[in-house]
Image (spheres, coloured by chain):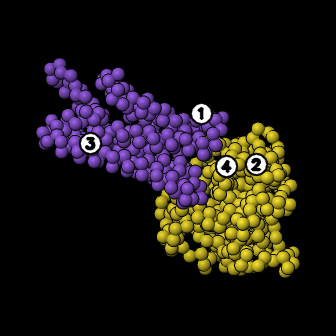
Amino acid sequence: MLIRKPADIPSSEITDERLYLDRRRFLGRAGAIGLATAASALAGSTLLQACARPDGGGDAEDTTTAGGAVVDTPTPYKDVTGYNNFYEFGTDKEDPSNPDNTRDFRPAPWTVAVEGMVKNPARYALEDFVKPSKLEERVYRMRCVEGWSMVIPWLGFPLADVLRRAEPLPGAKFVEFTTLYDPKQMPGQRHAVLEWPYTEGLRLDEAMHPLTILSTGIYGKPLLPQNGAPLRLVVPWKYGFKGIKSIVRIRLVDQQPRTAWSVAAPNEYGFYSNVNPTVDHPRWSQAKERRIGEFRRRPTLMFNGYADQVASLYSGMDLRKFF
Amino acid sequence: MDDAAAAAHAGAVGRGRPRRRSLVAVLKPAVFVLALAPAAFLAWAAFADDLGANPIKALEHETGKWAIRFLALSLAVTPLRKLFGWGQLATYRRPLGLFAFFYATVHLLIFAVLDLELDLGDVGREIVKRPYITIGFAGWLMLVPLAVTSTKGWIRRLGGRRWNRLHRLVYATAVLATVHYFWSQKKDITDPLIFTPFLVALLGYRLWEAARRRRLAAVAAPRSAGD
């Protein structure tokens, strides 16, 4: 995981904007080996330690790369913005990026409501909601429950910022999130393929975790509709569908919230949905994944490689029962 | 019914055998080329990296869809032939069925080779543990004897009656393939739902025909039923 806080970077190291915008081609030229060296230097220990194979072996040598380090090359922008699950705009992977489907969607002006068991409930215009926080770039792995994954440089800020500002009341145990509901703007909502509006939830400690962010951009650019404009959740150690998009409401509650996919198929999608290669989806194995852009599959990592930072949240918990 | 019988039937309609034969001679290669077109396009798209972000999944889905489409097309031959008297259609039943087998085999190979990377342990486990894959695999297995015995030689070796009975397996395959199609969808079952009425009609036709033949056989004097 790479956290770069703007204040820490000397101006001499700030990437020339042309190169920054052209980074896809730059990365391509630099090649995986070069990136492997850089990536392992910056994040190696976390990734290596987090590797846990289903058969119990703990080393990272079997994952695809040179020198035993797990290489996580950022996924090309065209794939991050062109291969999406966002049923509000259609159920095919290419639907959410199709302008025919997003033509009526208005990510601005946008309001976010913070409600429920908090001392300071409020409705914010998005700019005011984001302003108090420092935007950071977080390069996270994202693992879809379907068995594919990406590496995405999110631009965002900790959800904890928002929750601290709201001051949860003592009884608050969970955070519930809700997507915009407007079938005029989101044509997929005209079909009851999922229960609308899409809702998701986190336990309060998961929501307060430093890894959990609200994101407003990718690769330094504002979120496109297909990625959940203008505001979405990113919880990198859970399956991607927990990353609720186009958020309009954040509510503190004392009951475990309904979540869209566990309502749609309760035996297939649970509340926690932690990435776990040892707990299969009923219809397919979760032991391996296809990293978009790579030809060979790679082993799926426990907690998506973030076990070091999050495993303690679940100590003693039966992860098969609470899947 | 194979090519010889189809030609005989065409002749029996009495329109001039040579003309009917040459139409088939032109159309049959064209049908072959058309049937190969999806495979050609998929191969080209794969090499041109034009299959989207997850090309292996795209190949899996597309080959599966074409397999079930050709299965339906081959099942449509007899009803269309009998309902509209289009005798010359009969000659297409075998190639259409074989193309269904072709696409189904490619579909299985992409799953086993490209998706599961020939890890036979994984392949075996998935076939056994995932009901929708078990069903899909069973459907493919049933197509194997049908493909093998699709030739005139085998019709002769088995005899028409036994051959017909063996090839009724295709109905079971069609049902299994449809269930496999439904069960493989994550949530949105629109695609298999659109396909289902066709399958119901094609299989329903057989049930109706069988019932009709039983009624006729019960009513009429002892007379061997049709084909």
Q: Secondary structure at mark 3?
A: helix
* Contact, mark 1 vs mark 3 (Cβ under 8 Å): no
| Lower sequence index among marks 1 and 3 | 3
The residue that mark 3 highlights is B89
Indicate the amino acid at tag 4: Arg
* Contact, mark 1 vs mark 4 (Cβ under 8 Å): no
Q: Residue at x 59, y 59 (%)?
A: B53
Q: Is residue B85 left or right of residue A7?
A: left
Quadrant into which the N terminus of chain A falls: bottom right
Residue A35 location, x and y as percent? 78, 62
Crowding near the residue tagged with mark 2, few <14, some 14–19, many ≥20 C-alpha atoms within 10 Å: some
The residue that mark 4 highlights is A296
Indicate the amino acid at tag 3: Leu
Q: Chain of mark 2?
A: A
Crowding near the residue tagged with mark 1, few <14, some 14–19, many ≥20 C-alpha atoms within 10 Å: some
Rendered hue of chain B is purple
Residue A195 location, x and y as percent? 55, 57
Q: Is residue B160 left or right of residue A223?
A: left
> In this rendering, do the residues under marks 1 and 3 share a single chain?
yes
Query: Mark 3 and mark 2: span between their CA atoms?
Result: 54 Å
Q: Furthest residue to the top?
A: B222
